[in-house]
Image: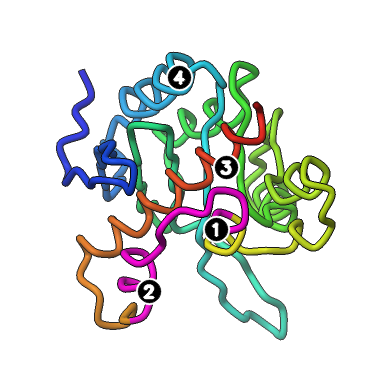
């Protein structure tokens, strides 16, 4: 059974998000953690998984080469952060299958370029995705909302206190690994709640 045994963080509504950060190696079995994320997304009723991807960019012969270096998945109760190896191995087929799931919608902020890069550089196709900014712009009748980042979008829709996230981000270069994981958990939880709010 997958255990989200990383630090837990209290959100502004006094709920908790449990975390797990994994340095993925060729022998790492990530499928139990992905299953736990999938189950939580279903149990919470809206079948959504908030995702964010991070890239390493190298310039080779005047051409930029993009490599997926980490990915974050968030639900109402969990945040999974996977640091990926430089070369993808057999165990990452679980990640490809997870992204291809028909059972959930992968929700993100400003994800159009990421979707194209995932397909172009790694052959990863996400069957069901949602750009939360576009949904918010239509739902609220405010086109500018589509172009906001995570913090600004969440503040505009939810009006939550952002002081803890702001505090971590203001000292990002000196932030501890724990603080960075907390920021990742907060951002994922915020976007989950934005999506939840827009479903009402």
Color scheme of the displayed model: rainbow
Front tag of 4 and 1? 1
The residue closer to the viewer here, 192 or 55, is: 192
Lower position in the chain sequence, tag 4 or tag 1: 4
Question: What residue is drawn where x is 51% and y is 38%?
Answer: 192
Q: CA distance from mark 1 to mark 2?
A: 15 Å
Dots 4, 2 in contact, CB < 8 A:
no
Lower position in the chain sequence, tag 1 or tag 2: 1
Q: CA distance from mark 4 to mark 1?
A: 22 Å
> Quick one: SS at disc 1?
helix
55 in magenta: no
> Quick one: SS at disc 2?
helix
Circle 2 residue: 169
The residue closer to the viewer here, 92 or 136, is: 136
163 in magenta: yes
Give percent across and percent down for residue 173. Answer: 32, 82
Lower position in the chain sequence, tag 3 or tag 2: 2
Q: CA distance from mark 3 to mark 2?
A: 20 Å
Question: What residue is drawn where x is 49% and y is 31%?
Answer: 93
> Quick one: SS at disc 3?
helix
Circle 4 residue: 44
Q: Which residues are magenta?
A: 154-170
Q: CA distance from mark 4 to mark 2?
A: 29 Å
The residue closer to the viewer here, 47 or 61, is: 47
Lower position in the chain sequence, tag 3 or tag 1: 1
Lower position in the chain sequence, tag 4 or tag 2: 4
Q: Which mark is residue 155?
A: 1
Dots 3, 1 in contact, CB < 8 A:
no
> Quick one: SS at disc 4?
loop
Question: What residue is drawn where x is 48% and y is 16%?
Answer: 42
Tell me if residue 78 comes above or below residue 63 in the rendering. above
């Amino acid at each position: 059974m997958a255990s989200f045994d990383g630090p837990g963080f209290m959100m502004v509504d006094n709920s908790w998000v449990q975390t797990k950060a994994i340095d993925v190696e060729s022998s790492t079995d990530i499928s139990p953690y992905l299953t736990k994320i999938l189950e939580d997304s279903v149990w919470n009723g809206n079948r959504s998984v908030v995702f964010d991807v991070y890239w390493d960019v190298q310039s080779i012969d005047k051409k930029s080469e993009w490599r997926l270096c980490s990915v974050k998945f968030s639900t109402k109760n969990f945040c999974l952060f996977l640091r990926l190896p430089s070369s993808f191995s057999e165990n990452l087929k679980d990640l490809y299958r997870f992204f291809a799931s028909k059972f959930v919608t992968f929700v993100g902020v400003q994800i159009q370029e990421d979707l194209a890069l995932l397909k172009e550089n790694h052959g990863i196709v996400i069957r069901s995705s949602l750009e939360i900014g576009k949904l918010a712009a239509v739902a609220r009748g405010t086109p500018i909302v589509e172009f906001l980042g995570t913090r600004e979008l969440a503040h505009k829709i939810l009006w939550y206190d952002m002081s803890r996230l702001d505090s971590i981000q203001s000292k990002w270069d000196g932030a501890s690994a724990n603080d960075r994981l907390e920021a990742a958990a907060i951002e994922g939880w915020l976007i989950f709640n934005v999506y939840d709010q827009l479903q009402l």
